[in-house]
């Protein structure tokens, strides 16, 4: 082989090796970003997809999905109404935990619709939450699972208390990042404040 052709072959090989190294580095960084962002959800999507090459695009699509709609902040007046309703729900939990839990689940759906998330079922809500609210998504799924078990008569009092605590954190997460100066909300008579709510304490006082 002439020297010139040999040099071209070597150069082409070096270019391919360099491109492959850059691609591997990009994939590692992309994988790490997805793992940090989605946590347990990343592992679940990968397991469901049976391979990283199919699972990572699925996780990335979740990142792009909510941007297709306009997610907006909750304005102070809306936040005040939500906080007032949440206080009423927590008070109701003492004597009617099943109904309070269902109302809490419905409230999460209304908040998400209010903010512009897609109006889907609980699975869609969960997937939307995974994009920017990974922890809240896990809590929502666990709490909603209790609601489903409640309909089958398979949820204990402890299950319902934990679910209410999860829902409280989801409400806080959906409000906290956007509302800078929400007005204070007059608490209903006998109210245990939203942030200090403990379903276990509520049940103990009933």
Image: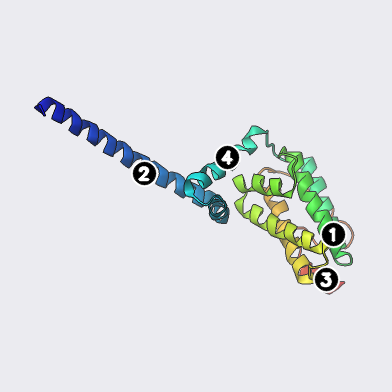
- Decide if residue 135 is on the left or right side of residue 95: left
Tell me residue 146's x, y (percent). 75, 62
Q: Is residue 142 visible?
A: yes
Query: Of the numbered discs in the image, which one, if any, rests on residue 24?
Result: 2
Could you tell which of marks 1 and 4 lies nearer the N-terminus?
Answer: 4
- Dot 3: within a 10 Å radius of its alpha carbon, few (fewer than 14), some, or many (20 or more) residues? some
- Residue depth check, mark 1 versus mark 4: number of the one nearer the observer: 4
Q: Are marks 1 and 4 in contact (CB under 8 Å)?
A: no
Query: x, y percentage for residue 16?
Result: 28, 35
How much space separates mark 1 and mark 3, taking CA atoms?
A: 12 Å
Establish if 157 lies above or below 6.
below
Q: How would you rate the neighbour count of disc 4 (Cα within 10 Å): few for under 14, some for 14-19, many for 20 or more?
A: few
For this view, does 48 lie left or right of residue 25?
right
Q: Residue at x 73, y 49 (%)?
A: 122
Residues at circles 3 and 2 in contact by the CB criterion of under 8 Å: no
* Spatial separation of the CA atoms under disc 1 and disc 2: 51 Å
Q: CA distance from mark 3 to mark 4?
A: 42 Å
Residue wearing tag 3:
203
Residue at horizontal 70 percent and vertical 45 percent from the top: 124
- Name the residue furthest front: 1
- Label 4 to label 2: alpha-carbon separation: 21 Å
Q: On the image, numbered disc 4 is attached to which residue?
A: 61
Q: Quadrant of the image for the C terminus?
A: bottom right
Give the mark count. 4
Disc 1 target residue: 100
Q: Are marks 3 and 4 in contact (CB under 8 Å)?
A: no
Q: Residue at x 71, y 43 (%)?
A: 181
Give how far across and how far down residue 40 sits, in percent.
56, 56
Q: Secondary structure at mark 1?
A: helix
| Rendering quarter of residue 195 | bottom right
Q: Is disc 4 placed on a helix, strand or loop?
A: helix
């Amino acid at each position: 082989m002439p020297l010139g052709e040999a040099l071209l072959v070597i150069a082409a090989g070096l270019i391919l090796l360099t491109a492959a190294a850059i691609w591997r580095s990009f994939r590692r960084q992309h994988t790490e970003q997805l793992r940090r962002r989605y946590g347990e959800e990343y592992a679940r999507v990968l397991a469901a997809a049976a391979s990283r090459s199919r699972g990572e695009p699925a996780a990335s699509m979740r990142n792009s999905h909510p941007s297709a709609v306009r997610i907006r902040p909750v304005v102070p007046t809306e936040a005040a109404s939500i906080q007032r309703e949440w206080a009423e729900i927590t008070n109701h939990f003492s004597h009617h935990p099943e109904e309070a839990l269902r109302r809490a689940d419905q409230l999460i759906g209304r908040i998400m619709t209010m903010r512009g998330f897609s109006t889907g079922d609980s699975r869609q809500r969960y997937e939307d939450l995974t994009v920017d609210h990974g922890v809240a998504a896990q809590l929502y799924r666990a709490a909603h699972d209790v609601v489903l078990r409640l309909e089958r008569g398979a949820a204990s009092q402890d299950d319902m208390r934990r679910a209410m605590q999860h829902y409280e954190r989801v409400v806080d997460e959906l409000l906290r990042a956007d509302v800078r100066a929400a007005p204070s909300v007059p608490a209903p008579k006998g109210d245990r404040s939203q942030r200090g709510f403990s379903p276990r304490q509520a049940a103990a006082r009933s």
